[in-house]
Amino acid sequence: MENKYSGLVTGPAAMFPRGYLLLIPVWYAVVAGLLVVKGRLPFWYTAIALGALLLAMLILAGVLATMRQKAFFVDVNGVWLGKVVRWKRSRRRRVLVPWSQIGQLRIASRHYGAQLEVVLGPAASIIHRHRLVSGIFFAGVTVIIPPRWIGRPPALLSARAKPLRYVVPLYATAEGLGSALAAIAPPTVQVTVAAD
């Protein structure tokens, strides 16, 4: 049996910053407001344009919510998060979380597949710094500029606090993922699958 596992990350977490899907209604509201206030168009045309914009927003949100990318890999070294970097100067890098820094792997079943939480142990060298002001600034800039150019890391590479962990939405069954990770993980790392 191979000591490797790769999985498909579902949703925009592998490419876009956390909360990116929530910006789509903001864009819609701004464009719809400008269309109504500044458009000076006949009522029937404004209603059709707003309906078309709403349909476009729903399609964009649906595509981003259901996209899948190969951005999760587990081997004897640890857990690799992120897409493979094709350019040397790319800000989107892969992160290796070594087994020595992982305390627990928690798996829960979700409607899209399984959610894996890579809970870091006390020996983790990854430092979580919560920067409120810069977070608000970059969230505001993301409304105008695509996230690729503003330097925010994808949601998959952003560690969450309390407890310090990475959250990975995977297109896999919770039981299959749990058995695959239990076979690869060292005995010091606890692999738990939440009951439905």
Image (cartoon, rainbow, N blue to C red):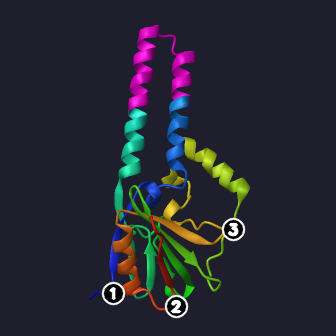
Tell me if residue 145 can be seen: no
Tell me if residue 166 can be seen: yes
Q: Mark 3 sits on what residue?
A: 129
| Residue 45 pos. (x, y %) | 41, 12
- Identity of the residue furthest to the bottom in this view: 187
Question: Secondary structure under badge 1?
Answer: loop
Is 48 colored magenta in this rendering? yes
Q: Earlier in the sequence, mark 3 or mark 1?
A: 1
Up-down: is 1 above or below 148? below
Give the residues in magenta.
30-55
Q: Mark 1: few, some, or many residues within 10 Å (few <14, many ≥20)?
A: few
Q: Amino acid at mark 1?
A: Asn
- Specify the quadrant that holds the C terminus: bottom left
Q: Using the image as rendered, state which of residue 117 and residue 29 is in the foreground.
A: 117
- Which labelled disc corresponds to residue 188? 2
Q: Amino acid at mark 2?
A: Thr
Question: Secondary structure under badge 2?
Answer: loop
